[in-house]
Image (cartoon, rainbow, N blue to C red):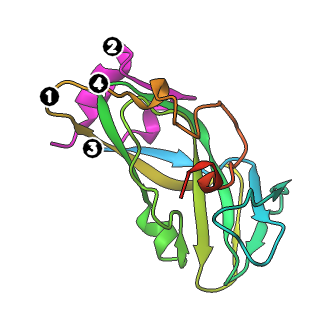
Amino acid sequence: MILSDKQILKSIEEGTIVIEPFDIECLGTNSYDVHLGKYLATYKDEILDARKHNKIETFEIPDEGFVLQPNVLYLGITEEYTETHATVPFLEGKSSVGRLGIDIHATAGKGDVGFCNHWTLEISTSHPVRVYKGMPIGQLIYFKVEGDINNYYNNKKSAKYNQRSDRPLESMMWKNIF
């Protein structure tokens, strides 16, 4: 079941959902709009290696915006810091963003109960498009969880993205043993 606007507000009042900064104008019928933060990043190497720590170069989006190019993976960040302690958050792109040819995540649209951080976005585009810090980029949808939880994300020793950051985070796949 997806939380309604009233249930999202109630969860915020109870502290089981945290959104900073929170703006009531961003609350939809059953979602909350999030915005593109001021930082983007790209990988330094042309060829990425799943067993290697692939370094990124982070830069600030200028006031006049930044033109995303096709065939480049950009890591972005949400302006909003979020915490989710009793529901499963899903991040989806806004339809207006999709109609500009922008995808905001390759595979990581679902968060875990206990996720506490800004969302790193995996941004790609089908053609050049100018983006701006603070523009609406996506929407969070919250799903109820059935049953008790033993393994909250923020308490997992193996969680790779627990350290709070307002900058995009590169893949930590290299920390896995395979």
Q: What secondary structure is found at the residue carrying circle 2?
A: helix
The N terminus: image quadrant: top left
Left or right placement of residue 96 versus residue 133 in this view: left
Residue that badge 3 annotates: 30
Point 69% across, 54% down: residue:
170
Whichever of labels 3 and 1 marks the residue nearer the N terminus, that label is 3
Residue that badge 4 annotates: 150
Residue that badge 2 annotates: 14
- Give the amino acid type for the residue marked by disc 2 in the picture: Glu
Q: What secondary structure is found at the residue carrying circle 4?
A: loop
Task: Find the magenta span and give its range.
Answer: 1-29
- Give the amino acid type for the residue marked by disc 3 in the picture: Asn
Of badges 1 and 2, the one in the foreground is 1
Camera-nearest residue between 14 and 57? 57
> How far apart are the two marked residues, 4 and 2, measured between alpha carbons?
21 Å
**Count of marks placed on residues:** 4
> How far apart are the two marked residues, 2 and 3, measured between alpha carbons?
18 Å
Whichever of labels 4 and 3 marks the residue nearer the N terminus, that label is 3
Q: Which mark is residue 147?
A: 1
Within-10-Å neighbours for mark 1: few <14, some 14–19, many 20+: few
x, y percent for residue 96: 47, 68
- Give the amino acid type for the residue marked by disc 4 in the picture: Asn
Left or right placement of residue 65 versus residue 152 in this view: right
Q: Quadrant of residue 66?
A: bottom right
In magenta stretch: residue 19: yes
